[in-house]
Image: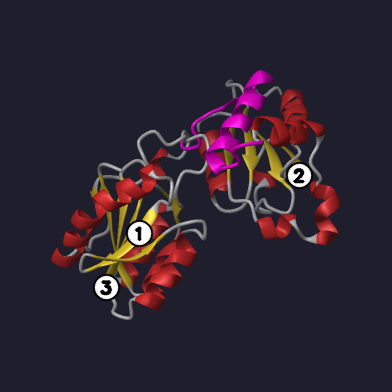
Amino acid sequence: MDQEPLGLIAGQGELPLMIARGARADGRAVCCVGLREQFDPRLPELCDRFETAGVVQLGRWIRLFRRFGVTEAVMVGRVSKKRMHDPWRLLRQLPDLRAINLWYRRLRHDRRNHAVLSAVADELDNCGITLIDSTSYIQDHMATPGPMTRNAPDADQAADIEFGWPILERIIQLQIGQAIALRERDTIAIEAVEGTDAMIERAGQLCRKKGWTLLKSTDADHDRRADVPTIGVQTIRNLHAAGGRCLAVGTGRVILLEKPSVIETAESLGVSIVGIDGA
């Protein structure tokens, strides 16, 4: 591997595994900082170097990457706040001085996700480590234009998508959420802080009739260094169980985790997936 090593800051889920596989297939060694109590146990064997650090131990991330010779890094994966607040694990998650300074100075007035990401990226950059686009090594798993399943949206679903997409664009602009559910041009549910899976469950409770449509995307200026919207196999299963039968996602703006499996699952359950240009 002749290229410089890629740093990987890894939380929960499949995404860190996909990044590690993609980077190594491209000829880059992967030097990973796995966030304690978060990362998938399969991840270490996919990495050339692997160490753990607390979620808010930014100083340790930097020290490890310097030791590994990392100048570019990707930060992906969910973080479970429930695991972070487990009292038996609290001592292992204590923030270091660098993280404390960032939290109480730079982030004192704005602690929304995008502000935290920007602050962390700037801190890493000041130490010679650049956070790069988190989709760089998984382009094959991004949403593509038009139907991605053999079963395309029917006329009613297509009408809901046409009606709902401008609403979704506005919701995204207002930083309310990244998804909405509709049926017969009625908005059933809007995603907020609870996340997509919880919103899907709520939409199923509110709309007893099957056949509603889920729209999910992000804006063109979304910071792709982290927090790119994702859809996985379990999302499709949850959608079907809640009565949803169509999923419309922003082209090039949503990751389908293990895309072939997502499409296969959707087709087996009769759920259509379509990529939409725009928001």
At mark 1, the secondary structure is strand
The part of the image, by quadrant, that contains residue 241 is: bottom left
Residue 145 image position (x, y, % from top left): 25, 45
Q: Which residue is mark 2?
A: 54
**Residue 93 vertical placement versus 47 (above, below):** below
**In-image side of 257 versus 213 (left or right):** right
What segment carries the magenta color? 108-135
Q: Earlier in the sequence, mark 3 or mark 1?
A: 1
Mark 2 vs 1: CB contact within 8 A: no
Which of the image's four quarters has the C terminus? Answer: top left
Residue type of the residue flagged with mark 3: Gly
Find the distance from the CA under tag 3 to the CA under tag 1: 14 Å
Find the distance from the CA under tag 3 to the CA under tag 2: 43 Å
Q: Which residue is mark 1?
A: 180
Q: Which residue shows up at 69% across the image and 20% down it?
A: 127
Residue 80: give its label.
none
The part of the image, by quadrant, that contains residue 1 is: top right
Residue type of the residue flagged with mark 2: Gly
Nearer to me, 96 or 70:
96
Q: Nearer the viewer, mark 3 or mark 1?
A: 1
- Residue count near mark 2 (Cα–Cα under 10 Å), binned few <14, some 14–19, many ≥20: many
Residue 211: give its label.
3
Q: Which residue shows up at 53% across the image and 45% down it?
A: 18
Residue type of the residue flagged with mark 1: Ile
